[in-house]
Image (cartoon, rainbow, N blue to C red):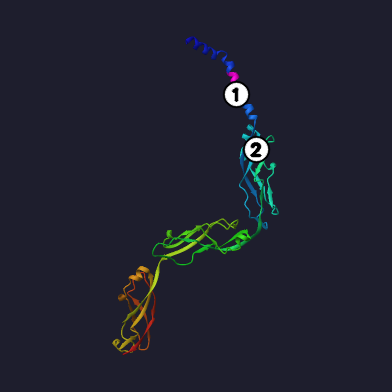
Amino acid sequence: MSAGGRSLRDLVTHNFGLKLTSLFVAIALFSMVRGAEDAQRSLFVDVAVALPAETDARILVSDVPERVRLTLRGSRSQVNAIRPEELTVTMDLTDTSLQYYYFAEDDFDVPASVQLSQIAPASVPLRWAERIERSLPIRPELSGELPEGLVLLEVPRLEPATMSVVGPRSSLRDVDELLTAPVDLSTLREGERALRVPLAPAPERCRFGSEEPVTVTLRVDIERRERSFEDVPVVTLGGEPENGARRAELRVTPTEVVVRVSGPVALVEAADPEAFQVEADLTGADEGTKVPLRALGVPTGVDVVSIEPPAVSVEGR
């Protein structure tokens, strides 16, 4: 066993440097042969598009591919060395009379020793439409609900109130207004709020005259309501009339009136009708004169809208 082992070791180590060199040469020759073999490779190349000027009377309404697939043939080493990002192609669509665009082999910077055997798609059909521009009103898209007890005081204001839109006539023919992105009412509180809101996406194949957001101004206040209180008694106040008659000899008509108030819902609903009075100040009043009325007992935060009638007549007994 030991003699056999030494013989095997001698066999491996004898002329070891020559054997190692031969191995490297064999590997190099195999790589050269392998790399020189014909190979086929498919790869996708990005497509850029050069469109007509924005002042052109026609606009493209058909889809164009974002990428095309190339099939390449050549030596394995050359084919594998090609990077897709180096082959980007630009479709020149500035001529609006074109009905088809055809990709050509010389559109792609492929090494001369590599064959471009297929382009897919090889051509792209083109459709054009009349380009128009319209100025359309903007409407805010309101979503959600205001917190309980709050209301919008007025229609939201927008700045700008209109926006120009450019696109094919077919896309803009039936569009009457533009919408903003949704405005969530549930986030609002009492007071005035100006929000910068983008527009909702433009109609298909259209663009806005400006990409700037619009300003939507909303005024929010506590919800108010009006309520009428009938048969509110009129009380009199004041000294002797100028003609010397005693105050007790004067009376007013009517003796009951209707008071209409406005205020926050909770306060108006909680108001006690028994607490309301209307005062007539008879100081200096004579028979036949009219005296204006003033409401008493109105809760804080509640406003008097009207008193009907607003004045009483002073009469003798």
Q: Quadrant of the C terminus?
A: bottom left
The front one of 166 and 19 is 19
10 Å neighbourhood of mark 2: few (<14), some, or many (≥20)? many
First of labels 2, 1 by sequence position: 1
Q: Is residue 311 magenta?
A: no
The front one of 257 and 13 is 13
Q: Secondary structure at mark 2?
A: strand
Q: Amino acid at mark 1?
A: Ile
Q: Which residue is mark 2?
A: 72
The front one of 308 and 4 is 4
Q: Which mark is residue 4?
A: none
Name the residue located 53 percent from the left edge and 12 percent from the top edge.
10
Contact between labelled residues 1 and 2, with CB atoms less than 8 Å apart: no
Relative to 160, say whether 36 is above or below.
above
Relative to 48, say whether 171 is above or below.
below
Which SS type dominates the magenta stretch? Answer: helix
Q: Amino acid at mark 2?
A: Leu
Q: Residue 26 at what x, y percent from top left?
A: 61, 22
Image quadrant where residue 239 sits: bottom left
Q: Residue 180 at what x, y percent from top left?
A: 52, 59
Asked whether, in this view, residue 152 is left or right of residue 102, the answer is left
Q: Residue 277 at what x, y percent from top left?
A: 32, 78
Q: Residue 254 at what x, y percent from top left?
A: 35, 85
Asked whether, in this view, residue 305 is left or right of residue 217, the answer is left
Label 2 – label 1 distance at C-alpha: 27 Å
Name the residue located 32 percent from the left edge and 87 percent from the top edge.
251
Q: Which residue is mark 1?
A: 27
Image quadrant where residue 282 sits: bottom left
Which stretch is magenta?
20-26
Image quadrant where residue 144 sits: bottom left
